[in-house]
Image (cartoon, rainbow, N blue to C red):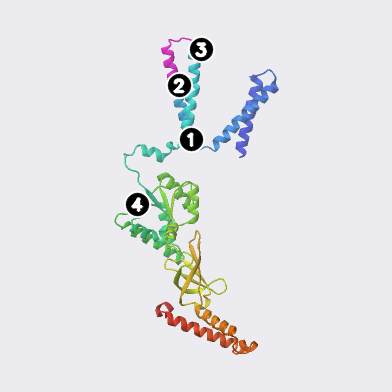
Amino acid sequence: MAWFMLARVLLVAAIVCAAVLLQPIHESPFVNAAFGGLLSLLIVLFEIQLRQTAVTSMLGALIGGVVGLAVAKAIAAGVGIWTNGLSDGRVAFLDSVLLVGLPYIGLIVGARHGEWLEPARLSQLFREAAPDRQYKILDTSVIIDGRIADVCETSFLDGVLVVPQFVLKELQFVADSADSMKRNRGRRGLDILQKIQKMAGVQVMISDIDFPEQREVDLKLIELARTMRGKIVTNDFNLNKVAQLRGVQVLNINELANALKPVVLPGEFMKVFILKEGKEYNQGVAYLDDGTMVVVDNARRMIGKNIDVVVTSVLQTTAGKMIFGRHIDLAAGAQGGQQSSSVGAGAGPGPGNGERTSSSERERTERAEREDSYRKTRPLPQAQQT
């Protein structure tokens, strides 16, 4: 930054000195110095704007301006020959408009279409006319995940699956890790790639295109997708967001899996296996076959059993779907109903009617009745208990 500031100061000083010495607009040195300072300020602002412009846009503007100027000179020469060198105000005005207008048009058009000067676009001009291939670029995480192989077997992915060389290097680095878990994940990713390559009807291409100026693999994937005009296949949430901000299309395996999960509405009944205790009081947690978590109220004492649950609400998040339900304890409800009916009928002495049994005996009785009720309705298989 110090060199840039020094260069700008020298530029302003040179233009101001030239304006004072040459006196372009007035005899007063102060007026010329102000004029030179204003002109130099405009030049510096123009230079700052150019720093934010892509190199291809500047090169396109330069080429377009040169081409526009050449066309204007050719037309002006043709008009001069046609008029036999006649000096007319209309001819001079036409020459001026051509010399100003055509370079301006070339400058604007070249700047707007400067991306065509990129090497990838230029190489396409010399290729044979063929239908565009649809490239699907695989990320490291989606290869290790393994579900991409199942998607390929169903033939839902068309086009060419592209595996960049830097992704293979990252997989090899993970497979050679000292950590056993990382090593197994890396080897699993290599096995998944080998499985995909052997599938019939699936075309896999290893790309050698690399971007040394980018250090992170995610940024390299984005640049490769922009170069090949392909889509990134991933299950990484952060890569998904960054790629969308860069204008690159993403196929997220997690979003596909969430979209294919069965729809459950509040009020429906389902049978689940309570696996563990929930975070809140008297909650149990179960899982469906697709991995969806089911949080069940009043199910803490039903761990290790299959129970019927009524769905109360469904929560859809970016990480997946969560189902909330409630277990209706029919045995406890029936007993509570009998006790309330006996109290309403006035059976036994009033205050001492609730003191016939101790609290421990009552709990044992309720637990025994509940277990007998569930054992009669549907006994639990031995395989699920283990």
Badge 1 amino acid: Ser
Q: Could you tell which of marks 1 and 4 lies nearer the N-terminus?
A: 1
Label 3 packing within 10 angstroms: few (<14), some (14-19), many (20+): few
Badge 3 amino acid: Gly
**What residue is disc 1 on?**
57
Q: Is residue 239 left or right of residue 195?
A: right
Q: Is residue 101 above or below residue 196?
A: above
For the N terminus, which image quadrant? Answer: top right
Badge 4 amino acid: Asp
Name the residue: 57% across, 73% down. Answer: 281
Q: CA distance from mark 2 to mark 1?
A: 22 Å
Q: Is residue 322 left or right of residue 347?
A: left
The secondary structure that dominates the magenta segment is: helix
Q: CA distance from mark 4 to mark 2?
A: 50 Å
Whether the residues at callouts 4 and 3 have beta carbons within 8 Å, the answer is no
Given residues 365 and 252, the one toward you in this image is: 365
Q: Could you tell which of marks 4 and 3 lies nearer the N-terminus?
A: 3
Label 1 packing within 10 angstroms: few (<14), some (14-19), many (20+): many
**What residue is disc 3 on?**
89
Span shown in magenta? 74-89
Q: Could you tell which of marks 2 and 3 lies nearer the N-terminus?
A: 2
Give residue 136's position: percent from left, percent from top: 39, 51
Q: Could you tell which of marks 4 and 2 lies nearer the N-terminus?
A: 2
Res. 386 visible in picture: no
Q: Quadrant of residue 346?
A: bottom right
Give residue 85's position: percent from left, percent from top: 45, 10
Q: Could you tell which of marks 2 and 1 lies nearer the N-terminus?
A: 1
Question: Of helix, strand and loop, which one carries label 1?
Answer: helix
Disc assigned to residue 72: 2
Q: CA distance from mark 1 to mark 3?
A: 37 Å
Q: Is residue 121 above or below residue 308?
A: above
